[in-house]
Image (cartoon, helix red, strand yellow):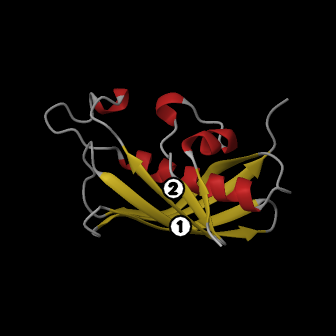
Amino acid sequence: MAQAFSAEQVAGLLPHRGHALFVASVEVDGDTVRGECVWQREHPHLDGHFPQMPIVPGVFLIEAGAQLAGVLIAARHPGERGLGMLAGVRRTLVHRPVLPGDRIHFELDVRANPGGMFDAKGTGRFADGGKAVTLDLMVAVRAPAD
């Protein structure tokens, strides 16, 4: 059964704050996580990327996928003590540029591996269903530094 998380609940599961928190609405259904991201033109990192044609950086799409995986890990694997952190990018393909204001719908399958590692694979799609990005990520759970 799917479990929906509000923006407030997401903030309670992730350490990100302010402009570094990319996801707000999230749904976890078994090993699948779905969520939406929108980067507004006013986002401070879009000012120089690029001044004449602002484009959401591909690393933002990767980070959004990692944050979604982090929500699933925190919700479904409470025995994993620590924070989910992006540990690797096996493959990423940006299919079309994401522009400020575009709503990207992510869906990722997140699977546990030994040693606190997780694989997160999936896509981000535009509202019209077209692919924005394909992701194959590794997320590690690490204890916070004392």
Q: Is residue 25 left or right of residue 104?
A: right
Q: x%, y% of residue 63?
A: 50, 48
Q: Are marks 2 and 1 in contact (CB under 8 Å)?
A: yes
Residue at 63 percent of width and 67 percent of height: 119
Q: Residue at x 52, y 38 (%)?
A: 21
**In terms of depth relative to the viewer, which is nearer, 96 or 39?**
39
Where is 14 relative to 125, above or below? above
Residue 8 or residue 37, whichever sits in front: 8
- In the image, what residue occupies the spot 47% across and 52% down? 62
Type of the residue with mark 2: Gly
* As drawn, 40 above or below 35: above
Q: Is residue 1 above or below residue 36?
A: below
Q: Position of residue 43 (x, y in %)?
A: 35, 31
Q: Is residue 94 left or right of residue 110?
A: left
Q: Quickly name the residue at label 1.
A: 108
Residue 127 in the image: state x and y as whole percent.
29, 62
Foreground pick, 79 / 93 = 79
Alpha-carbon span between mark 2 and mark 1: 7 Å
**In this rendering, is residue 9 above or below 128?**
above
| N-terminal label among 2 and 1 | 2
| Residue designated by label 2 | 65
- Quadrant occupied by the C terminus: top right
